[in-house]
Image (tube, coloured by chain):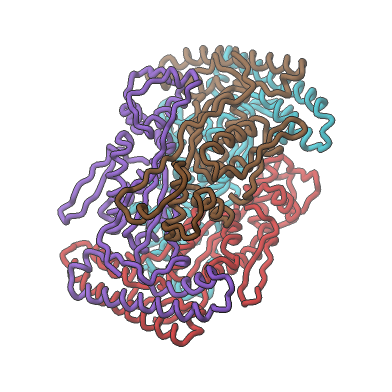
Chain colours: A cyan, B brown, C purple, D red
Amino acid sequence: MKFIREPIVRLIAVTHFSKPTDLDEFNLWQTDTDNPAQQLIEAAGRTCYRSWHNPSGRTNQQYIANLMSQGHLSVIEHASASFYIRGISRACSHEIVRHRHFSYSQLSTRFVDESESDFILPDAIADDAQAMEAFTQAVTVAQEAYRKIYERLRDKFANVEDRTLRRKLARQAARMVLPHALETALVMTGNFRAWRHFIRMRATEHADVEIRKVAIAVLEQLQQVAPAVFGDFTIKTLDGGVTVAEPAFLYE
Amino acid sequence: MKFIREPIVRLIAVTHFSKPTDLDEFNLWQTDTDNPAQQLIEAAGRTCYRSWHNPSGRTNQQYIANLMSQGHLSVIEHASASFYIRGISRACSHEIVRHRHFSYSQLSTRFVDESESDFILPDAIADDAQAMEAFTQAVTVAQEAYRKIYERLRDKFANVEDRTLRRKLARQAARMVLPHALETALVMTGNFRAWRHFIRMRATEHADVEIRKVAIAVLEQLQQVAPAVFGDFTIKTLDGGVTVAEPAFLYE
Amino acid sequence: MKFIREPIVRLIAVTHFSKPTDLDEFNLWQTDTDNPAQQLIEAAGRTCYRSWHNPSGRTNQQYIANLMSQGHLSVIEHASASFYIRGISRACSHEIVRHRHFSYSQLSTRFVDESESDFILPDAIADDAQAMEAFTQAVTVAQEAYRKIYERLRDKFANVEDRTLRRKLARQAARMVLPHALETALVMTGNFRAWRHFIRMRATEHADVEIRKVAIAVLEQLQQVAPAVFGDFTIKTLDGGVTVAEPAFLYE
Amino acid sequence: MKFIREPIVRLIAVTHFSKPTDLDEFNLWQTDTDNPAQQLIEAAGRTCYRSWHNPSGRTNQQYIANLMSQGHLSVIEHASASFYIRGISRACSHEIVRHRHFSYSQLSTRFVDESESDFILPDAIADDAQAMEAFTQAVTVAQEAYRKIYERLRDKFANVEDRTLRRKLARQAARMVLPHALETALVMTGNFRAWRHFIRMRATEHADVEIRKVAIAVLEQLQQVAPAVFGDFTIKTLDGGVTVAEPAFLYE
């Protein structure tokens, strides 16, 4: 067992556009970007207005900014991004999965052995010796209880023929003693509109510490990947040391 | 602290139809049921086919069965049901909220004091003395640690002026030691199609014990409320004592 | 054939709450409203905060206003409303069904005979004699063509044994000549949050005439049904005679 | 004006995976495919089971097939695909946009001039001289009426200062005479699970001719892009010359 202080958040997938070579409208169309996600968004916008000839002479960045400023946010739904997230607690993941416009694949406590797993240690607890002592004792006792219960129940269910089912029956009961601090891992995928909403809701002072860190890490990577879509968010650190982000375009 | 063995699942709301009095089609239409949810479903179906005169002479039950047998399930989306669910663990609620077609309002561990809360005790643990001892010790130590950490952090954040924020900062850190067995409560709302899917996925032998009990309790109540929609599910008890349910109409 | 000038919009269903009689928290809880949808919303809110004893002494109206002002909009998702909508064109319905959080049952042009159907006449056309003449001729020629094509194809597909399939094959081809002005009918169901979004997007000056009329009619009825949820919208008539609505609570 | 007989369906974007270089689990993991969408799906699955070391020694194709055969379909949600679709009627697009799990950007009849637009000609009509004559006359009269009404209303709204709004007011009224055969164009994006559902529902004998052609064209391209996900569908031509597709894995 070790204690984890910071989430790991890695962009692992993003939408790639490829231009059809045999259609007049796409041959007519010229854009100044080679950003694969932003090309798709511009193409989607130009489909709505049949404006492949770019009558206003806008750059890709200007074109997307113009759509967004008019509240025409649906075009950014065509691009999506996937993150691999680890080093967060199951308290945090329980909040994350409440966002219903995303797809999730999460480490299963029913299938996976958690007897050597790690735990998330909140800064507020780490900074206080007595809190830290209580925390350490609680997670240690919990993980020992997990091992003990798992062992007992695996024997109890020894008559269940299917080995995977036998373990699952034991683990799903044993996991009940595991603390919310238990580390989890997940892959989380959503389109750019969903990510904007997630960031707006979670990169604020009012959000829980862990989910805010995730939201900021997501934003930093998406600003690299699609500056025209996420560039209006400003990241800043408040007096208490809390990092938050705020969008210029309010609607998502 | 007490240990809870069975979930509490109560239907608290359902859709009520009321017939417009000034439209020819509704005046022409006659149905043999006074079930308020099933009337709405029939009306939705007859809107698609402009068949208010009931050319096939079907009862409401027959009409709905006929739509469902043709895979025309979207009509049952018009009726929805809300359940108040308590006596389940946060391990269970973490699985429940993965169902993205529902609306949830769940007891917040960030806002609410959990120092006197109860815990879910799995049957498999209760049946084994040594597992039970480990379980009892773990949850007891955890709740004591929760109280201790909360007390320390409330003092630490004493300089935070907003009383609600101060408590939230302390509770969101302290909750990290609470076990997954912690009782939670939620209101869960979904349309009949979403409920059929939930039941089909969760009232099976492969599901976790708690969520299966919830699914069966939901089904029993929905079969009272809308027999034409949920009547095809058969509830049965398997050899090991596990209660499951299976639909006759496979698609949802 | 006749020409239709105004949509018909009728509330036909809404969520009804019924209080469980055997649970302490519900017995403790007292509210000052008998509004069945608003009771459910308050109960959902109190589930989150375990505040059944109403520590702030709020009325139901105040309680819901407080949640909404904090952006805690998810609680209003538990209540839903269904409308029967007729007297709109298929141009309008094509826009309506783009709202993905609703459930729809719409009159099918593949299954239903449209040879005697009516058409929506826009005010702007009705007010101009020459536009009116062109409109009348176009829809008349179109409906005659529909009848002719249907007749020819029904004969052509005479060898198809299934009578419903035979008609469907003929109608799905024949409908291609029908104008977008063709009247349609649908049942549309969504939760209160989805309806707030629909109204905010569609009851504005920028929206199409027909869909704006639908949004205003929906709002007027929902303000009766759930004043605490929709009461912040102000309906007003602009200089050009256009009726619009604007919310006080911006986020939905 | 010209008549269009076949839809144009082009894959324009798909999800690209890129492996993080600094995480133990991803360094441990080896897969036999360089397919960027399928790599992501495997990584999502291995996140659930913490099985980066591939204990069963499965190929990527076998791994995905195994997940799908167990009904664990959520993993294929992480990959998405976008299609540019043209040469379909607005009758067809009205059906397409009923699929609520997709994102759409569609050519706007409110913003775009349709006075020179093309129309979809159904095979059943093209094959019958009298039906063809009625069809040709109807769409010709309709487009002439569109031009006439647009001209009248543009003058009528001459006092509206905003040029875009002036045109929009005229076009949204004038479009009411346009037939359902009017060609439209759209960009349609969805994850692989949504596409499987779309294909299963629309590549059948019961579907409308146009939407079935779209579904088959989508499937053919997705089978190239992600054979492990779409390879179980069999495309075949029925006696009447209708091309359909059927999946081996029933659940989506």
Pick whichever, A10 or D7, lies toward us: D7
User: Residue D56: in sight, yes or no?
Assistant: yes
Report which quarter residue D62 is drawn in: bottom right
Report which quarter residue C57 is drawn in: top left
Q: Which residue is found at the position 30% from the left and 36% from the top?
A: C227
Q: Which residue is found at the position 43% from the left and 51% from the top?
A: B43
* A161 on left or right of C120: right
The quadrant the N terminus of chain A occupies is top right
C65, above or below D135, in the image = above
The count of marks equals 0
* C147 on left or right of C140: right
Pick whichever, A39 or A105, lies toward us: A105
B18, above or below D190, in the image = above
**Residue A124 appears at what percent x and percent y?**
53, 21
Q: Which residue is found at the position 75% from the left and 49% from the top?
A: D30
**Residue A237 appears at what percent x and percent y?**
43, 32
Q: Which residue is found at the position 61% from the left and 60% from the top?
A: D200
A168, above or below D54, in the image = above
Report which quarter residue B118 is drawn in: top right
Pick whichever, C136 or A69, lies toward us: C136
* A161 on left or right of C24: right
**Residue B120 appears at what percent x and percent y?**
63, 22
**Residue A137 appears at what percent x and percent y?**
66, 15
Q: Residue furthest bottom?
A: D129
Pick whichever, B198 or C116, lies toward us: C116
User: Residue D15: in sight, yes or no?
Assistant: no
